[in-house]
Amino acid sequence: MSNTKKRIDRGSLITLCIILLIFVVTVVLENTINANSLLFTVIRKGAVYSLVAVSMNLLNGFTGLFSLGQAGFMLLGAYTYAILTIPNSVRDTIYYLFQGSSFHFSLLDIFQGALGETFGLIVAVILACICAGIVAAFFAFLIGLPVLRLKSDYLAIATLGFAEILRAIFQWEKLGKVTNGANALRGYPTFSDFNIKNSSGMIVFRLSSFVPLLLAGICIAIIVLLINSSYGRAFKAIRDDEVAAEAMGINLAKHKQLSFCISSFFAGVGGALFAMFASTVQAKTFTSAMTYEILLIVVIGGIGSISGSCLASFLYIACSEWWLRFLDNTMYIGGTQVPLLRNGFRMVVFSVIIMIVVLFFRQGIMGSRELPDLFRRKRIKEGKSDE
């Protein structure tokens, strides 16, 4: 028994060391190489997509509820974050088409006035992200009352319809004083605002890639703790067999609603982080295609694997935003244009790669395993060979 515990602890310890090393390497690279490198775009967007993918996996992979409403909850989170943190000094210029905004306060102004510029920024951003999650969870609770009675494809269609309706409502001109209609919201704090500057405004230490990793990492760690709790075991029981779970005393309606709200909460936080990444918020960005991207990441990583969702997020973003970008550039060899290499060809190749991965990795990259399991399996094999 003691040897088994040592193996388990060692697997978790190695995983923790890898995560800490990633944080350290990110900070070092960001302050040593060109800050405009696409590597940092991959890190920031990959961190955001990791959180949203894990939140979807909590619902689809661990509870067995097929929902396609992540883009809608991200939209709610992004708009909540932006509206609460836009400084009052620029609010009227952003809502100029509607003669000003219905909101006349800013969390950023309140906390920076009370705590100073640096600590006020940190507290305001954290509180706004929490509010973004709460708003998303509240709407999830309301929509979940009728929708969670549905199953399988019907639930997916209902949640997808909710996301599309929500996107249309947020572009409605009647709500212009709140959402700015179809126009973009901007001027709120972004990841670059966390860079440390000197008195003359020069950046002396960059943290714009470390911050999204940290925030997403904390949220994912909370989800991992939830999955390993009694509630997480109840979610898995519902996924495996609803009849058996109910016979064991699990309240199906309560736990489904809880899983749906928690998943939506973290999707809302992910929406706030996406707003910080994109620097602007506009409803037309949160289309159903975004939900399909997140679902694809979950499938590629492995349904029921947190590590797989995180790994697949960074691989997906790296391929789509960085590694295959050269395929969109026209190339000439000996004065002859290379066929097919033109704008848009990158996504064709990317789609072929995705098809190959799905065909040959039916369970995804990680299946239902987690990163510590790989090290534990290795240790067990080594122990057998030693004997």
Image (cartoon, rainbow, N blue to C red):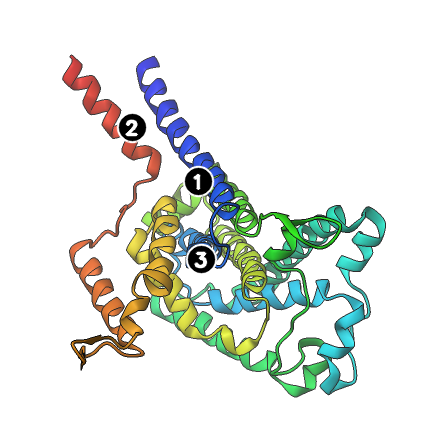
Q: Compare marks 1 and 3 and give the one earlier in the sequence.
A: 1
Q: Which residue is drawn at 34% across and 13% down?
A: 2
Q: Which residue lies most toward the front here?
A: 334
Residue 5 in the image, given as x and y percentages of width and height: 36, 19
The answer to whether residue 249 is seen in the rendering is: no
| Quadrant hosting residue 318 | bottom left
Helix, strand or loop status at disc 2: helix
What amino acid type is highlighted by mark number 2?
A: Arg
What amino acid type is highlighted by mark number 3?
A: Ser
Horizontal side, residue 182 vs residue 317: left or right: right
Query: How far is mark 1 from mark 2, CA to CA?
Result: 21 Å
Q: In which quarter of the image is the N terminus?
A: top left
Query: How far is mark 1 from mark 3, CA to CA?
Result: 17 Å
Residue 119 vs residue 156, the one in the foreground: 119
Residue 342 in the image, given as x and y percentages of width and height: 27, 79
User: Which residue is label 3 attached to?
Assistant: 37
In the depicted structure, whether residue 204 falls above or below residue 89: above
The answer to whether residue 31 is seen in the rendering is: yes
Residue 39 in the image, given as x and y percentages of width and height: 42, 55
In the depicted structure, whether residue 275 falls above or below residue 217: below
Q: Quadrant of the C terminus?
A: top left
In the depicted structure, whether residue 164 falls above or below residue 299: below
Residue 207 vs residue 378, the one in the foreground: 207
Residue 86 in the image, given as x and y percentages of width and height: 72, 66
What amino acid type is highlighted by mark number 1?
A: Ile
Helix, strand or loop status at disc 3: loop
User: Which residue is label 1 attached to?
Assistant: 22
User: Which residue is label 2 attached to?
Assistant: 376
